[in-house]
Every structure is written in C-alpha cells, then in structure tokens.
Image (cartoon, rainbow, N blue to C red):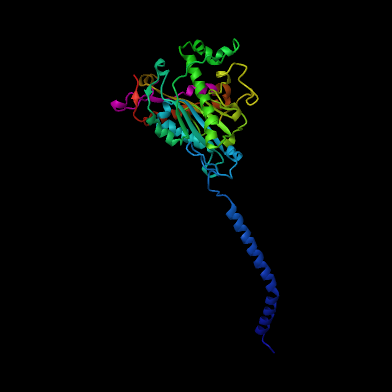
Amino acid sequence: MPGSSHIVAMISAVDLQALLPVLRRTVVVALLCSATFLWNWLSLPDQNLPDALPLQDVNSSYVSPDQSMDEYEKRHAALLLVGAARSLMWPAVCRNIKERLVDALSGPARNASWKAHVFLFLTLEETDAKALSKRSQHKYTPSQLKFCSNLLEAKHVELMPASYPLPLFTKNCQPGKEPVYVNFSAIWNLSGASERMYSQCKRIQVAYDFIQQEYEPKVGVKYAVMIRARPHSVYLRPVPSLEHFNISRYTVAAGALEDHWHLVHRGCTGPAVRDCLKCKGEEFDEDCPPEPFDRDTLVNPVVVREINEKYAKYLKMHVPKRPKQFRHYGVLYLECFRCKGHMQSKFPAQYKNDTGFCDRQQKIYLESALPAIGHFVA
C-alpha cells in the first residue's frame, strides 16, 4: 500500500494538470494588460514640463504642426510694460516685477497652465521731472536696460519717443466730445499736460497694435489675453495666476488708477481710459461694450519713484551714504498714499485690516542696488 506522501504527490500532480489551462489563460491576460498599460504610459505627454507648447520669441516663427491656435490661445498672455522706464532701471524694482508679476501670472512652475510673455515699450527720457522738483532725473542709455530686459526675458524691446505731437483729428469730434487729453493742461493748470496725457495713451495704443498687427502674424501666435502694466510700479504681493481671472472681463487693480494695471480681452485693447484717444461717445463698440471694470483686490501695484536727497530728508527718510560719484542718485519712494486712498474709498473694510502693509515694504527699497552707471541730468 503506497505511503501517505506518495498519495499526496499523486493528488498534487492531478490538480496541477487540471490547473494548467487556467494558469495559461491568466498569464496571457496579464501579459496583454501589461502591454496595454505600457503603451498608454508611453503615449502620455511629459507631465514634468511647465508648458506643453514651445516658447515663442521674436526671432522664431516655429509652431508645432500638432498645436492648434486654440491650444496656444488658452495658455499664453502678453504682458506689456509701457511708459517711462524710470525706476525700472533699479534692480530691486525689476526683480519685484519678475517675481511678483511675471512669474506669479504663470502660476506654480510644476503645474503652470499659463505663460506670460513680456514686451517692453519704454521711453528712457524724462519730460516732466524738471517741472517736479521732488524727483531725480537721469538720462539712461539702452545698454543700462539690458539687465532688466534679460531678467524678464523680454520678447520685444522698443524704445519710444518721450512725447508725440498732438494730432489734428480732434476736429472730427463734435464740440464737447473731444478726447480727454485735449483739456488736460487747463485741468491740471500745468503747461504740457495735454501732450503728456496724449503721449501716454499713444504709447499704449502703439504697443497693443504692434502685438496684434506685427508680432502675432510674424510668430504665428494669438494671445488670449493682454495685460498692460506701468514699468515703474512694484507689487506688494504676488498677483494671482491667470487662472484666477475671468479673461472675458476687463479687470483693473483695486488700489490703483485704471491705467496703472489692467487685464483685457482682445476686443478691448488700448488705453484703459477709452476716450483717451477717441471722441467721447465713440470709445466703445460690439467688441468692447461699456461694461464696468472688475476691481481685483488681490492685485496691488504701487508706483515707486526715485526722489532726490533733499525731498527724502524732508520726508525724514534714511538716505544711504554713497561714494561721491553716486550721490546724484536719490532713493526709491513707494507712493503708498495713492494705494491707501483708493483702497480706503473703494474697499474700506479691507483697508482697515491692512493699513501699514505698504509702508512696511518701503524699507526693502531704501538699500536697493543702484542702476548701471548712467548720466545724470542736472
């Protein structure tokens, strides 16, 4: 009579033969599932890339054939820094714009779904500092702008005239319907104010026209949204990413004038003051209806100016000691009173809880490194 171990071996052999077909089917199914998973995994786009689309620049017209215009339009914005360079030439100001505006608009690098492309439309000359004795005036050169244009990775840099001659087209406007700049000299009681106002608006329009009429057709892109910002402003906090904004709406910063920072859709490109260049009553159309602005309290630009040593001491500000050859530089002064005034009038509850935030940041800019050596205008 066979032993118990021999009996167990016979039973195991029988069971194994019965299980072989099942095991074969299981292995085949497992191999098929593994192959399917591997194929799907290899087909996925690289999730580590911050952008699924290549960055475009002014010297490149490459657009991948499998990237539609709609895909590009959803992911990119044109950020236009337009105006007098002024304090943008100071490294602390440029770094603030890079970190708290440009990078912040794109959102966290790991999952950024937007990318802001920077365009610089600047005048290096001053037309009003002589009339305003509190400010310092410099004659900057294009080479001094390289630090900031490189830091911001500017797609286009255009140096603009300090002023534009007043046009004659206002004769086409009905009496009392002239653009707002026409009467600015009388309103401000300051000679040349109308020219300054017109030039500010003209520069903004020239910048928008360049993007839509020249840059986009040349590069083969179409920006979904455009943002105009002053080049001589800093941001008290990082602005929200572009995913935060309703890009179908006209959005402005809550604590500043509309022309200091505004985000617009393609139909409303131009100065925030719509009748700045157009006859009153003709400033809106179907593409840009007369809707109220969205005022965003999370966008906090503050104008920063270089004031001279005399005025800084009058304000009881600390003036850093500098070698003689650098004493013509003043100090950077945040115009917190502007931000406070706007917030107090429009958002008093929020202002009440944040009254000294701007003043505390003033200290950051007092010890700022100086711009690259330039020429001082006495």
Q: What is the x, y in percent for residue 184?
A: 51, 13
Residue 320 lies within the magenta run: yes
Quarter of the image holding residue 279? Answer: top right
Q: What is the x, y in percent for residue 366?
A: 39, 28
286 with respect to 369 (left or right) = right
Can you say which quadrant of the picture contains the N terminus? bottom right
How many numbered marks have been drawn onto this rendered protein structure? 0
**Closer-to-camera residue (328/207):** 207
**Closer-to-camera residue (162/256):** 162
Q: What is the x, y in percent for residue 68?
A: 60, 41
7 to 343, vertically: above or below: below
Quarter of the image holding residue 14? Answer: bottom right
Q: Residue furthest bottom?
A: 1
Q: Which residues are magenta?
A: 315-342
What residue is rendered at 68% in x and 83% in y? 7
Q: Residue furthest left?
A: 324
Residue 369 visible to an observer of this rendering: yes
Residue 239 visible to an observer of this rendering: no
**Closer-to-camera residue (373/177):** 177
Can you say which quadrant of the picture contains the C terminus? top left
Q: What is the x, y in percent for residue 30?
A: 64, 64
Residue 321 lies within the magenta run: yes
309 with respect to 97 (left or right) = left
